[in-house]
């Protein structure tokens, strides 16, 4: 029995408020957390001063016992290392949440996830090719994401091309993704086996991390995710209708194959952005939409932006947990999202097996 | 100029690979009509419905909805012309009914618009109309099957289309909910508000609610007309392979069919080893129950002399019973009588149905008399109070002659069948070479 409309409206309101307040607190907390311990008051002061453009204090460390040299190091760490990392976690988490929410909608399958489609494997293969063959290595910051991006998007397009011939079944598409992911992993193993150089970086890529974060990367990621995410949010009503099955959706004026393809393509693109900058981080896209649906109902006009918000906070929490549990360095985030996500995935699988068959027409 | 019909299907052909699903179907539905589409499984009903919805592209032929080829409508335009009520919907999310019904408003808005106040009012009114107003806030997964089907109807109605297609809408419902749903649909079409095409398995439901019945068989349109014109025992035998009896409901005046048994196509033609032949003398439908019962028991059955187009003759034909047949309403000709005598001569038992005897078939009884001495004859008494002698006593005299010849008189069909079993091998079930009972 679903929550009544009033309850639901109240819950959505509460969720929104909680996300905003909790989000701000978490961001501030996270920005002070990292490999180097920074006194809380000092960190806050640095943050406020930098955000206000230096108008608040004559110097970031005014009123503290910190020396000027130390202060500028702290400022650099907070402003140029921690904050970009935090923001990239938010952006990528949002991207994965958006991709997961819209893919679950378009496939009518609560187990759909950007990584099930093999898009991430394609991105990783692209990155591996970059590392192993040292293409454009002089300009690594630019070329690495580009290679990952090309790998991810072309995998997405390949899946679409394979599936488009017989679009009738969602299972076809999902299984195509799974098969393709395995094939790409095999190719990746082969590449690494014959070219051991660079395999260390690729390993890091396979588990995902925020190592590339800086203001420029954040800017590019934010711009693309904002644009693609806005487009995805526009398909909310269409996805609502699609939940009735593609035939019923079509009889009611929606759910055209072209629309479904567009949603899948947008989700692939946004996943590609995430993979390009952070490598493979699983389960954010799987878990986030479920949390939103549980609290705020099944309306995709809410689920998609909500998944972005939850995904962002989920990934940021993973970063923080990494620093709290293993102080001193940031471990690959894929480890932490998997620890949280896999039990959740198994729970979903178990529940789904008891209630309804997989997939649907 | 009269408005174009709601549906015009011309020479429609659809195939799935090598299998032909629809073959040269022509079909037109005037606005405001309630058409029941019926036929056995695999006859093409669903294919036709799906073609009308534009889900299938026909291999040949054209489909027009209100004068526009369906392929030329965009998905949204189509959804404003025609709404669909499927058998069931595979739903995953427990959406509140009110929200679910609002999905039907989709084609009336730009995808980015929100539902308006008038949409909400319409949804409430429709939920009221289908009797679900008090469940508006319940989830679609938590209501009963009958309510679910009405919710699906409500969602389709929210599209406010002039044409409504239903695909076996009652197949998951109990009888009360079947009647409930169809009477609601019926009332929609009553004032010409909505044209309805419904694929229905149940011929009696179709006859009860539809203005017109279209029968499909193996992808072809084989019958089309008012329920009274279309429903017949012959139709059921030919199209469904089912022996049935046709009755007229005294209160509504509508025909109804009472299915009796399956006519299996694989049933071997009564072989020479099967006991018999048993000959049935009948006419006008009085012999049909006997023909069916004896065939069912596995006898080789013959019949005569019957008039073409009467129920006995049609039943005989559908059962593969050899019969001497005369032209409709004509007195029995010498030829027919001769053929009838041959059948009488071959029979090992003769059963006389309580048929109405008139001048045109009195010869049946007269021809029978000489055989009564050599062959066991079983005569079925007419139901009490039934007058069957329309020849000023000649028929009664003939029956009296049979009685004095030592024939057995029985009261009903089962008794007649038992008597046949007794006079033949003394108990049918023990006899060897009997075809398997169906």
Image: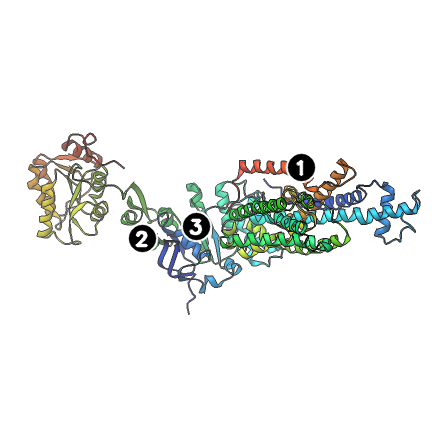
- Image point 92% across, 47% down: which residue? A68
Relative depth, front residue between B409 and A275? A275
Give percent across and percent down for residue B412: 21, 36
Residue beneath the point at 74% across and 55% down: A219
The crowding category of the residue bearing disc 1, from other C-alpha atoms within 10 Å (few below 14, some 14 to 19, many at least 20), is few
Q: Which quadrant is home to the C terminus of chain B? A: top left
Q: State the residue position of label 2.
A: B230
Q: Residue at x 33, y 52 (%)?
A: B218
State the image quarter where residue B292 is shown. top left
Evaluate whether label 3 is on the same chain as label 1. Answer: no
Circle 2 chain = B
**Mark 2 neighbour class, 10 Å CA radius: few under 14, some 14 to 19, many 20 or more:** some
Residue bearing the label numbered 3: B167
Q: Position of residue B255 (x, y in %)?
A: 32, 48
Q: Secondary structure at mark 1?
A: helix
Occupied quadrant, residue B113: bottom right
Tag on residue B415?
none
Circle 2 or circle 3, nearest the eye: 3
Horizontal side, residue B83 vs residue B393: left or right: right
């Amino acid at each position: 029995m679903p929550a009544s409309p009033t309850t639901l409206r109240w819950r959505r309101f509460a969720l929104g408020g909680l996300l905003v307040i909790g989000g701000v607190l978490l961001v501030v907390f996270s920005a002070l957390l990292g490999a180097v311990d920074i006194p809380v008051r000092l960190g806050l002061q640095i943050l406020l001063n930098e955000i206000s453009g230096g108008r608040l204090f004559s110097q970031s460390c005014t009123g503290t016992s910190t020396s000027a040299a130390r202060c500028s190091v702290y400022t650099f760490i907070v402003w140029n290392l921690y904050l970009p990392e935090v923001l990239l976690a938010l952006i990528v988490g949002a991207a994965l949440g958006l991709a997961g929410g819209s893919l679950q909608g378009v496939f009518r399958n609560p187990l759909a996830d950007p990584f099930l489609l093999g898009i991430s494997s394609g991105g990783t293969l692209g990155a591996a090719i970059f590392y192993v063959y040292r293409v454009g290595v002089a300009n690594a910051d630019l070329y690495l994401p580009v290679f990952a991006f090309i790998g991810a998007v072309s995998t997405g397009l390949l899946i679409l091309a394979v599936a488009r011939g017989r679009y009738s079944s969602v299972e076809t598409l999902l299984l195509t993704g799974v098969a393709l992911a395995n094939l790409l992993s095999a190719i990746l193993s082969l590449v690494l086996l014959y070219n051991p150089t660079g395999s260390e970086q690729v390993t890091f890529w396979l588990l995902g991390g925020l190592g590339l974060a800086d203001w420029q990367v954040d800017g590019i990621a934010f711009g693309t995710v904002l644009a693609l995410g806005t487009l995805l949010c526009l398909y909310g009503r269409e996805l609502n209708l699609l939940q009735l099955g593609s035939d019923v959706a079509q009889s009611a004026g929606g759910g055209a194959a072209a629309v479904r393809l567009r949603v899948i393509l947008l989700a692939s693109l946004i996943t590609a952005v995430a993979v390009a900058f952070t490598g493979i981080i699983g389960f954010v896209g799987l878990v986030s939409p479920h949390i939103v649906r549980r609290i705020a109902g099944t309306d995709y006009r809410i689920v998609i932006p909500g998944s972005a918000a939850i995904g962002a906070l989920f990934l940021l929490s993973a970063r923080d947990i990494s620093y709290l549990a293993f102080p001193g360095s940031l471990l690959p985030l894929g480890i932490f999202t998997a620890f949280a996500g896999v039990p959740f995935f198994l729970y979903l699988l178990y529940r789904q097996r008891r209630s309804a068959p997989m997939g649907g027409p | 100029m009269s408005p174009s019909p709601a549906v015009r299907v011309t020479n429609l052909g659809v195939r799935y690979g090598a299998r032909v699903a629809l073959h040269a179907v022509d079909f037109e539905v005037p606005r405001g009509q309630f058409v029941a589409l019926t036929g056995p499984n695999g006859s093409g009903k669903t294919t036709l419905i799906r073609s009308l919805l534009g889900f299938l592209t026909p291999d040949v032929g054209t489909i027009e909805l209100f004068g526009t080829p369906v392929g030329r409508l965009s998905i949204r335009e189509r959804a404003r012309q025609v709404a669909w009520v499927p058998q069931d919907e595979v739903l995953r999310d427990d959406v509140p009914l009110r929200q679910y019904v609002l999905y039907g408003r989709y084609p009336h808005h730009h995808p980015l618009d929100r539902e308006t106040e008038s949409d909400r009012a319409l949804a409430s009114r429709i939920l009221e109309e289908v009797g679900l107003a008090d469940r508006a806030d319940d989830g679609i997964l938590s209501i009963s099957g009958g309510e679910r089907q009405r919710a699906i109807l409500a969602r389709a109605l929210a599209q406010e289309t002039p044409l409504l297609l239903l695909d076996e809408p009652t197949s998951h419902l109990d009888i009360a909910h079947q009647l409930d749903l169809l009477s609601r649909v019926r009332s929609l079409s009553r004032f010409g508000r909505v044209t309805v095409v419904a694929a229905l398995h149940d011929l009696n439901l179709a006859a009860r609610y539809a203005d017109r019945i279209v029968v499909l068989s193996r992808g072809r349109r084989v019958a089309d007309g008012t329920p009274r014109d279309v429903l017949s025992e012959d139709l059921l035998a030919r199209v469904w392979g089912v022996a049935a009896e046709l009755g007229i409901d005294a209160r509504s005046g509508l025909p109804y069919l009472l299915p009796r048994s399956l006519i299996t196509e694989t049933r071997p033609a009564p072989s020479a080893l099967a006991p018999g032949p048993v000959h049935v003398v009948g006419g006008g439908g009085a012999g049909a129950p006997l023909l069916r019962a004896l065939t069912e028991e596995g006898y080789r059955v013959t019949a005569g002399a019957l008039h073409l187009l009467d129920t006995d003759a049609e039943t005989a034909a559908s059962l593969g019973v050899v019969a001497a047949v005369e032209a409709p309403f004509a007195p029995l000709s010498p030829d027919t009588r001769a053929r009838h005598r041959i059948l009488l001569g071959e029979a090992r038992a003769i059963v006389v149905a309580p048929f109405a005897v008139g001048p045109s078939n009195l010869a049946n009884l007269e021809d029978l008399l000489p055989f009564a001495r050599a062959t066991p004859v079983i005569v079925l008494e007419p139901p009490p109070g039934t007058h069957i002698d329309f020849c000023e006593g000649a028929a009664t005299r003939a029956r009296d002659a049979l009685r004095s010849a030592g024939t057995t008189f029985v009261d009903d069909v089962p008794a007649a069948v038992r008597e046949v079993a007794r006079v033949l091998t003394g108990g049918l079930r023990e006899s060897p070479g009997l075809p398997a009972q169906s």
